[in-house]
Amino acid sequence: MEKKTGILTVVSGFSGSGKGTIMKQLLEKYPDNYALSISATTRSPRPGETDGKEYFFRSTEAFEEMIKNDELLEYACYVNNYYGTPKAYVQEQLENGKDVILEIEIQGALKIKEKYPDTVLLFVTPPSFEELERRLTGRGTESEAVIRDRLCRAAEECDGVEAYDYLIVNYELDSCVEQVHSILQNEHTKIKRKESFLLEIKAALAAYSKGE
């Protein structure tokens, strides 16, 4: 039987696009198919956070050792703290046949795509600027200045969207979840992901034709 290997997938999107909600529902609906990558960070745990669940919490020295030993798919420094994606956890999940989903910003996504060309990149967007603004305002948790900053940031992010494989327009949550699931399941049937299986079939056919 052909051994199923998972697909590395990166999901990005504008703040307010609903990407986090989509990923949460996807994992809840199809827990045997997907695993959400857990990032490592040097920031202190917040109340209720557990090492190995929300994040892998590491000291600055330990994180820099991970960088030195090339143990991260990507990493960045935000507000004096490191954040990164450990290779070992991702590889373990992929070998177990699960598609590993990384929810990271566009620069990190493009770095991963450069290093691992088979990575699938999905970008999530609301159906319009007006809807994006409405969703950000509707949260009721941020000031007008913060919302303006997020919208300006979204304008900057548009420059890198063309490098993504799929654009997911989030009209409605349930249909969006099914669209993402369908895309990733179809990815498994692409010829480039079936090369070892094809080689086995070709070898068997060649041997049969020779009477072996």
Image: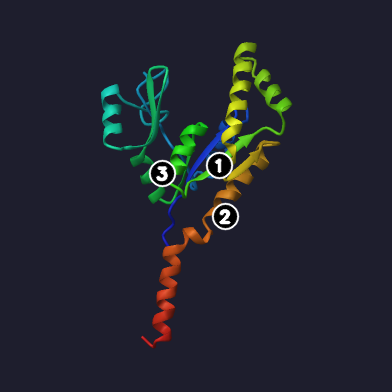
Relative to 87, 150 lies left or right? right
Residue at 70% of width from left, 36% of height from top? Answer: 171
Q: List the residue tagged with mark 1.
A: 163
Give percent across and percent down for residue 51.
35, 27
Spatial CA span between label 3 and label 2: 23 Å
Residue at 55% of width from left, 37% of height from top? Answer: 23
Relative to 4, 156 lies left or right? right
Dividing the picture into quarters, in which one does residue 206 lie? bottom left
- On screen, residue 26 above or below 15: below
Placement of the C terminus among the 4 image quadrants: bottom left
Look at the image and tell me whether residue 143 can be seen: no
Q: List the residue tagged with mark 3.
A: 115
Amino acid type, mark 2: Asn
Q: Crowding near pointer 2: few (<14 within 10 Å), some, many (20+)? A: few
Say which label, 2 or 1, has the lower sequence index.
1
Q: List the residue tagged with mark 2.
A: 186
Q: Crowding near pointer 3: few (<14 within 10 Å), some, many (20+)? A: few
The residue positioned farthest toward the bottom in the image shown = 211
